[in-house]
Amino acid sequence: MPLPDLNQARRDLDERGFVVLEEFIDADWLSELQQATERLFEIEGSAAGSEFKIEIGSRRLANLVNKGEVFQRVVAEPRLLSYIELVLGAEFKLSSLNARSANPNNGVSQPLHADMGAIADDQGYWVCNSVWMLDDFTAQNGPIRVVPGSHRWKQLPQDLIDDPSIPHPDEEIVTGAAGTVVVMNAHAWHGGTANRTDLPRTALHAFYARRDKPQQQYQRELLSESVQTSLSPELRRILALDDSLNDEVTKNCQQRSGFLK
Protein backbone atom coordinates (compact mmCIF):
# COMPACT_ATOMS: atom_id res chain seq x y z
CA MET A 1 0.00 0.00 0.00
CA PRO A 2 1.48 3.40 -0.95
CA LEU A 3 2.34 5.76 1.88
CA PRO A 4 0.33 8.99 2.12
CA ASP A 5 2.05 11.78 0.23
CA LEU A 6 3.55 14.58 2.27
CA ASN A 7 0.70 16.97 1.51
CA GLN A 8 -1.89 14.54 2.87
CA ALA A 9 0.33 13.70 5.81
CA ARG A 10 0.74 17.40 6.59
CA ARG A 11 -3.05 17.79 6.65
CA ASP A 12 -3.46 14.80 8.95
CA LEU A 13 -0.74 16.03 11.29
CA ASP A 14 -2.09 19.59 11.31
CA GLU A 15 -5.72 18.61 11.85
CA ARG A 16 -5.62 15.34 13.81
CA GLY A 17 -2.10 15.33 15.23
CA PHE A 18 -1.03 11.99 13.75
CA VAL A 19 -0.68 10.05 10.51
CA VAL A 20 -0.74 6.26 10.04
CA LEU A 21 1.85 4.78 7.66
CA GLU A 22 0.79 1.24 6.78
CA GLU A 23 3.35 -1.36 5.62
CA PHE A 24 6.18 1.06 6.39
CA ILE A 25 8.57 -1.66 7.65
CA ASP A 26 9.29 -4.40 5.13
CA ALA A 27 9.05 -8.04 6.22
CA ASP A 28 12.80 -8.70 6.54
CA TRP A 29 13.49 -5.55 8.56
CA LEU A 30 10.45 -6.20 10.74
CA SER A 31 11.71 -9.69 11.54
CA GLU A 32 15.16 -8.31 12.40
CA LEU A 33 13.65 -5.71 14.72
CA GLN A 34 11.36 -8.22 16.41
CA GLN A 35 14.20 -10.65 17.07
CA ALA A 36 16.68 -8.00 18.21
CA THR A 37 14.16 -6.41 20.57
CA GLU A 38 13.08 -9.67 22.16
CA ARG A 39 16.70 -10.78 22.53
CA LEU A 40 17.47 -7.57 24.45
CA PHE A 41 14.51 -8.10 26.75
CA GLU A 42 15.91 -11.56 27.56
CA ILE A 43 19.49 -10.34 28.04
CA GLU A 44 18.63 -7.30 30.17
CA GLY A 45 15.97 -9.02 32.27
CA SER A 46 14.83 -6.99 35.26
CA ALA A 47 17.27 -4.19 34.37
CA ALA A 48 15.61 -3.58 30.99
CA GLY A 49 14.84 0.11 30.52
CA SER A 50 16.81 1.18 33.57
CA GLU A 51 18.80 3.80 31.63
CA PHE A 52 15.53 5.74 31.57
CA LYS A 53 12.38 4.73 33.44
CA ILE A 54 10.60 1.56 34.55
CA GLU A 55 6.85 1.36 33.91
CA ILE A 56 4.44 -0.86 35.85
CA GLY A 57 2.63 -3.27 33.55
CA SER A 58 5.12 -3.00 30.69
CA ARG A 59 8.61 -4.02 29.70
CA ARG A 60 10.83 -1.23 28.44
CA LEU A 61 14.16 -0.88 26.67
CA ALA A 62 16.12 2.36 26.45
CA ASN A 63 19.22 3.69 24.67
CA LEU A 64 18.61 1.46 21.66
CA VAL A 65 20.94 3.35 19.30
CA ASN A 66 23.73 1.90 21.46
CA LYS A 67 22.46 -1.65 20.95
CA GLY A 68 22.71 -2.48 17.29
CA GLU A 69 22.82 -1.27 13.71
CA VAL A 70 19.27 -2.48 13.13
CA PHE A 71 18.09 0.19 15.57
CA GLN A 72 20.39 2.87 14.15
CA ARG A 73 18.63 2.36 10.80
CA VAL A 74 15.33 3.26 12.47
CA VAL A 75 16.35 6.71 13.64
CA ALA A 76 17.98 7.65 10.32
CA GLU A 77 15.32 6.22 7.99
CA PRO A 78 14.91 8.95 5.33
CA ARG A 79 11.21 8.30 4.74
CA LEU A 80 10.54 8.71 8.46
CA LEU A 81 12.55 11.91 8.72
CA SER A 82 10.52 13.53 5.95
CA TYR A 83 7.36 13.07 8.06
CA ILE A 84 9.05 14.24 11.27
CA GLU A 85 10.07 17.43 9.45
CA LEU A 86 6.41 18.21 8.78
CA VAL A 87 5.96 18.72 12.54
CA LEU A 88 9.31 20.06 13.69
CA GLY A 89 10.72 21.82 10.65
CA ALA A 90 14.17 21.08 9.26
CA GLU A 91 16.14 21.57 12.50
CA PHE A 92 15.51 18.53 14.70
CA LYS A 93 17.41 15.70 16.41
CA LEU A 94 16.72 12.34 17.99
CA SER A 95 15.45 12.67 21.54
CA SER A 96 15.36 8.93 22.36
CA LEU A 97 14.84 5.48 20.89
CA ASN A 98 13.06 3.10 23.24
CA ALA A 99 10.94 -0.01 23.14
CA ARG A 100 7.74 -0.57 25.11
CA SER A 101 5.95 -3.90 25.42
CA ALA A 102 2.56 -3.91 27.16
CA ASN A 103 2.43 -7.02 29.34
CA PRO A 104 -0.32 -9.60 28.79
CA ASN A 105 -3.49 -8.77 30.73
CA ASN A 106 -1.71 -5.91 32.46
CA GLY A 107 -4.88 -4.05 33.44
CA VAL A 108 -3.03 -0.72 33.18
CA SER A 109 -3.65 2.22 30.86
CA GLN A 110 -1.21 5.08 30.59
CA PRO A 111 -2.67 8.44 31.53
CA LEU A 112 -3.20 10.84 28.68
CA HIS A 113 -0.06 12.93 28.36
CA ALA A 114 2.10 15.01 26.05
CA ASP A 115 5.65 13.71 25.70
CA MET A 116 8.16 15.57 27.90
CA GLY A 117 5.17 17.47 29.32
CA ALA A 118 5.69 19.68 26.29
CA ILE A 119 3.55 22.66 25.32
CA ALA A 120 4.11 24.35 21.96
CA ASP A 121 5.97 27.65 22.30
CA ASP A 122 6.30 30.83 20.23
CA GLN A 123 8.39 28.95 17.67
CA GLY A 124 5.81 26.19 17.33
CA TYR A 125 5.87 22.46 18.01
CA TRP A 126 8.98 20.87 19.49
CA VAL A 127 8.27 17.17 20.09
CA CYS A 128 7.33 14.49 17.56
CA ASN A 129 7.14 10.74 18.17
CA SER A 130 6.92 7.72 15.91
CA VAL A 131 5.51 4.39 17.03
CA TRP A 132 6.85 1.37 15.14
CA MET A 133 4.41 -1.52 15.53
CA LEU A 134 6.41 -4.73 15.94
CA ASP A 135 3.18 -6.58 16.70
CA ASP A 136 -0.34 -6.06 15.42
CA PHE A 137 -2.07 -3.31 17.40
CA THR A 138 -5.63 -4.49 17.98
CA ALA A 139 -8.48 -2.94 19.94
CA GLN A 140 -7.77 -5.39 22.79
CA ASN A 141 -4.00 -5.62 23.16
CA GLY A 142 -3.09 -2.12 24.32
CA PRO A 143 -3.17 0.16 21.28
CA ILE A 144 -2.54 3.90 21.41
CA ARG A 145 -5.32 6.34 22.12
CA VAL A 146 -5.05 9.90 20.84
CA VAL A 147 -7.32 12.90 21.31
CA PRO A 148 -7.37 14.38 17.79
CA GLY A 149 -6.60 18.08 17.61
CA SER A 150 -5.36 18.32 21.20
CA HIS A 151 -1.88 19.31 19.99
CA ARG A 152 -3.34 22.73 19.14
CA TRP A 153 -4.75 23.40 22.61
CA LYS A 154 -1.44 24.34 24.31
CA GLN A 155 -2.61 22.71 27.52
CA LEU A 156 -1.75 19.49 29.33
CA PRO A 157 -4.41 16.93 30.24
CA GLN A 158 -3.47 16.83 33.92
CA ASP A 159 -4.25 20.55 34.13
CA LEU A 160 -7.75 20.19 32.68
CA ILE A 161 -9.19 16.80 33.61
CA ASP A 162 -9.49 15.09 36.98
CA ASP A 163 -8.30 11.65 35.88
CA PRO A 164 -6.22 11.42 32.68
CA SER A 165 -6.21 7.61 32.99
CA ILE A 166 -9.87 7.14 32.11
CA PRO A 167 -11.22 7.20 28.54
CA HIS A 168 -11.66 10.64 27.00
CA PRO A 169 -14.91 11.24 25.09
CA ASP A 170 -13.03 12.43 22.00
CA GLU A 171 -10.20 9.91 21.97
CA GLU A 172 -9.47 7.74 18.94
CA ILE A 173 -7.98 4.25 19.18
CA VAL A 174 -5.15 3.68 16.69
CA THR A 175 -4.76 0.10 15.48
CA GLY A 176 -2.67 -1.41 12.70
CA ALA A 177 -0.82 -4.45 11.44
CA ALA A 178 2.76 -5.17 12.46
CA GLY A 179 4.99 -3.09 10.20
CA THR A 180 2.84 0.03 10.53
CA VAL A 181 4.39 3.26 11.82
CA VAL A 182 2.40 6.08 13.40
CA VAL A 183 3.97 9.55 13.29
CA MET A 184 2.47 11.76 15.98
CA ASN A 185 2.75 15.36 17.00
CA ALA A 186 3.69 14.49 20.56
CA HIS A 187 1.98 17.56 21.98
CA ALA A 188 -1.26 15.67 21.22
CA TRP A 189 -2.79 14.00 24.24
CA HIS A 190 -2.12 10.28 23.95
CA GLY A 191 -1.35 7.12 25.89
CA GLY A 192 -1.15 3.36 25.68
CA THR A 193 -4.27 1.43 26.70
CA ALA A 194 -4.52 -1.74 28.77
CA ASN A 195 -3.57 -5.05 27.18
CA ARG A 196 -6.50 -7.43 27.63
CA THR A 197 -4.97 -10.38 25.78
CA ASP A 198 -2.64 -13.24 26.70
CA LEU A 199 0.23 -11.98 24.54
CA PRO A 200 2.56 -8.98 24.84
CA ARG A 201 2.23 -6.03 22.46
CA THR A 202 5.55 -4.46 21.47
CA ALA A 203 6.57 -1.26 19.69
CA LEU A 204 9.59 0.95 19.19
CA HIS A 205 9.31 4.67 19.93
CA ALA A 206 11.64 6.85 17.85
CA PHE A 207 11.18 10.24 19.46
CA TYR A 208 12.51 13.53 18.04
CA ALA A 209 12.85 17.09 19.34
CA ARG A 210 13.52 20.49 17.86
CA ARG A 211 17.23 21.38 17.91
CA ASP A 212 16.91 24.03 20.61
CA LYS A 213 15.15 21.72 23.09
CA PRO A 214 16.57 18.99 25.37
CA GLN A 215 16.88 15.35 24.45
CA GLN A 216 14.85 12.91 26.52
CA GLN A 217 17.94 10.70 26.71
CA TYR A 218 21.29 12.45 26.38
CA GLN A 219 22.87 10.52 23.54
CA ARG A 220 26.38 11.87 24.04
CA GLU A 221 26.47 10.48 27.59
CA LEU A 222 24.64 7.21 26.92
CA LEU A 223 26.35 5.96 23.77
CA SER A 224 29.59 4.03 24.24
CA GLU A 225 32.77 5.49 22.81
CA SER A 226 33.07 2.59 20.36
CA VAL A 227 29.55 3.15 19.04
CA GLN A 228 30.07 6.90 18.73
CA THR A 229 33.25 6.50 16.71
CA SER A 230 31.55 4.01 14.38
CA LEU A 231 28.66 6.28 13.41
CA SER A 232 28.34 8.07 10.09
CA PRO A 233 28.41 11.89 9.99
CA GLU A 234 24.67 11.85 9.26
CA LEU A 235 23.90 9.73 12.33
CA ARG A 236 26.12 11.94 14.47
CA ARG A 237 24.11 14.93 13.25
CA ILE A 238 20.76 13.27 13.97
CA LEU A 239 21.98 12.29 17.45
CA ALA A 240 23.40 15.80 18.13
CA LEU A 241 26.71 14.30 19.25
CA ASP A 242 28.73 17.35 18.16
CA ASP A 243 26.16 19.99 19.02
CA SER A 244 27.19 22.36 21.81
CA LEU A 245 23.65 23.76 22.07
CA ASN A 246 22.33 20.27 22.73
CA ASP A 247 24.92 19.80 25.47
CA GLU A 248 23.82 23.07 27.05
CA VAL A 249 20.07 22.44 27.01
CA THR A 250 20.13 18.72 27.81
CA LYS A 251 22.66 18.35 30.62
CA ASN A 252 20.54 20.00 33.29
CA CYS A 253 17.08 19.12 32.00
CA GLN A 254 14.81 17.75 34.73
CA GLN A 255 11.62 16.99 32.78
CA ARG A 256 12.18 13.83 30.71
CA SER A 257 8.75 12.20 30.62
CA GLY A 258 5.16 13.27 30.31
CA PHE A 259 3.96 10.91 33.05
CA LEU A 260 6.67 8.54 34.33
CA LYS A 261 8.36 9.61 37.57
Image (cartoon, helix red, strand yellow):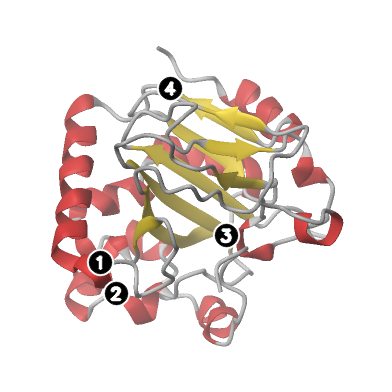
Residue type indicated by callout 3: Ala
- How many residues crowd around disc 2 within 10 Å: few (fewer than 14), some, or many (20 or more)? some
Circles 1 and 2: CB atoms closer than 8 Å: yes
Say what secondary structure mark 1 lies in: helix
Eyeballing the image, is 113 above or below 169? Answer: below
Work out which residue is located at the far bottom of the displayed protein and give it. Answer: 252
- Distance in Å between CA atoms under marks 4 and 3: 24 Å
Q: Which mark is residue 209?
A: 3
Mark 4 in CB contact with mark 1 (< 8 angstroms):
no
Give the image location of residue 59, x and y in percent.
34, 57
Residue at the spot of label 4: 22
Q: CA distance from mark 3 to mark 1?
A: 19 Å
Mark 4, secondary structure of its residue: loop
CA gap, disc 2 to disc 4?
31 Å
User: Residue at 76% across / 30% down in the picture?
Assistant: 15
Q: Is residue 143 above or below residue 68?
A: above
Tell which residue pokes out farthest to the top in this image.
1
